[in-house]
Amino acid sequence: MRAYHFRRIVEEDLSLIAQWRATQHVREWWGPPTVEDERENLADPRIAMWIVELDDRPFAFAQDYDVHGWSPHPFSYLPPKSRGIDQYIGEADMLDQGHGSAFVRQHVERLFAAGASAVGTDPHPSNGRARRAYEKAGFAVTSEPVDTPWGHAILMECWPKRTAP
């Protein structure tokens, strides 16, 4: 199993994030780069933002957040200390190689080790690549398609093996 390195995003990384957000494969599911202000997210204590690296090469973005930090939130029913995750592979040559499911699983294991009760994610129902990656990483679909404040989604959950519902 490959070891991915997660490092906190700093101000200097925002230009790389902007480059990735402008690529077609990211825009398809995340929308135009202007949809979210990453500088604002970087300052938000409810959100932890990460650059994912493999062999010292940055190739993906990941974030985790407090699902109870927004009201309403589609995962507000999850227990305290639950986290939500979002991510994408920014480098097109790293797609379709199994990196998505592998780094998501590693990130989720990191969250569980830090005390997360459960982890939720909410891909677009038509994003088959993301859904397959999450399933490989241990997530299960727990809803029909729903409309959330952040768009159309299906809800998926991952629980630590020791406390699966």
Image: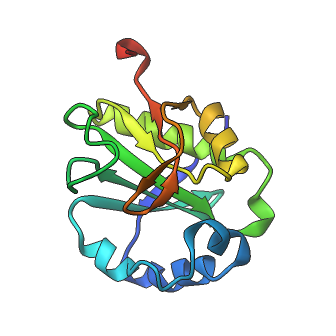
Left or right: where 72 falls relative to 26: left
What residue appears at the point 47 percent right and 43 percent down from the top-left corner? 107
Does residue 57 appear in the picture of this structure?
Answer: no
What residue appears at the point 54 percent right and 32 percent down from the top-left corner? 139
- Decide which of 105, 57 is in the foreground and name it: 105
Q: Quadrant of residue 63?
A: bottom left
Q: Residue 83 appears at what percent x and percent y?
A: 33, 43
Left or right: where 123 falls relative to 77: right
- Decide which of 140, 41 is in the foreground and name it: 140
What residue appears at the point 66 percent right and 57 percent down from the top-left corner? 55
Q: Residue 80 appears at what percent x and percent y?
A: 19, 35
Compared with 81, 51 (above or below) is below
Q: Residue 48 appears at what percent x and percent y?
A: 33, 59
Q: Quadrant of residue 53?
A: bottom right
Number of numbered discs: 0
Tell me the colour scheme of the image: rainbow
Quadrant where the C terminus is found in the figure:
top left
What residue appears at the point 23 percent right and 31 percent down from the top-left corner? 79
Compared with 133, 139 (above or below) is above
- Decide which of 40, 165 is in the foreground and name it: 165
Q: Residue 75 appears at what percent x and percent y?
A: 33, 42
Q: Quadrant of residue 102?
A: top right
- Decide which of 95, 58 is in the foreground and name it: 95
Quadrant where the N terminus is found in the figure:
top right
Does residue 145 appear in the picture of this structure?
Answer: yes
Left or right: where 98 falls relative to 13: right
Compared with 56, 96 (above or below) is above
